[in-house]
Amino acid sequence: MNSAPLKNLAIIMDGNGRWAKERGLSRTKGHEAGAETIRDITTYCAKHPEIETATFYAFSTENWKRPKLEVDFLMKLLSKYLKNELKTYQENGIRFKAIGDIHAFSPALQKRIKETESLTKDNTNLTQILALNYGGRAEITHSVNSLIEEGKTHLTEEDISSALQTPYSDIDLLIRTSGEERISNFLLWQLSYAELSFTSTLWPDFSSKELKSILSSFKNRSRRFGGLK
Ligand code: FPP
């Protein structure tokens, strides 16, 4: 039996480009299909009472290195996604939150992110967190600097946890799609005791059926958190 419930789920969505290539499509088609998958998985999580947050790695600090055309496309897709998603958020009781440094985005996109956060802030079934221009090391560094600026000279783990951008300090389960088995600078602090699940499915093909099966195998894992049982 599990010693802790599954409250906080994190997902590294990988494989949009390969999914498109396999079909002779442009990479952007893969990202569009990937955005649909985020909707399906988020809606599924909102109906799963145990899950409180689902955090998706949507744009890493390293993703700026991609060709400008692809970066521009991802920005437009994000803006379109948030606009279209409002109905889904409200109908399914989903609160939206962004983590990462969104100041690097256009003022219009920043505004849309802030507005979506504000319009959905009272929804309670699930918090969907999109990591945008996010890096785990940057988040920890930012947390420590903000505590130093407050005048703290000695930090505890609780201090650092409480100054992170996420509303939780621990992820229970991390899923990464597309067969890569790396953390890629995602939620470094919060993943300390997470169970890890890697699947070869490419993100656009990932389904709530597969998620359901991963969640049931998570239930059978024994989480010891360094203890004996
Ligand atoms: C990885 O695929 C995917 C990303 C760049 C991040 C996830 C982005 C999306 C799902 C697009 C839509 C997001 C939102 C929030 C609207 P990849 O391009 O690295 O795939 P590859 O490794 O096969 O090339």
Image: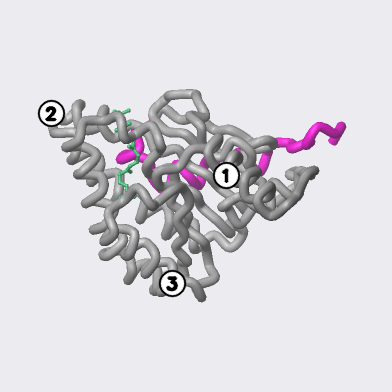
Q: Quadrant of residue 223?
A: top right
- Asked which colour scheme the image uses, the reply is one colour
Residue at horizontal 46%, vertical 48%?
Answer: 100
In the image: residue 3, left or right of residue 18: right
Q: Which label is found at residue 24?
A: 2
Q: Amino acid at mark 3?
A: Ser
**Does residue 16 show up?**
yes
In the image: residue 193, left or right of residue 12: right
Q: Amino acid at mark 1?
A: His
Which SS class for mark 3? helix
Between the C-alphas of marks 2 and 3, the distance is 40 Å
x and y, in percent, of residue 124 in the image: 54, 71
In the image: residue 216, left or right of residue 119: right
x and y, in percent, of residue 103 in the image: 38, 52
Q: Which residue is mark 1?
A: 142
x and y, in percent, of residue 14 in the image: 37, 33
Tell us which disc is closer to us: 2 or 1. Answer: 1
Q: Are marks 3 and 1 in contact (CB under 8 Å)?
A: no
Between the C-alphas of marks 2 and 1, the distance is 42 Å
Q: Which residue is mark 3?
A: 118
x and y, in percent, of residue 111 in the image: 33, 64
Residue at horizontal 37%, vertical 69%?
Answer: 115
The stretch of residues the image draws in magenta is 201-229
Q: Which label is found at residue 162?
A: none
Q: Amino acid at mark 2?
A: Gly
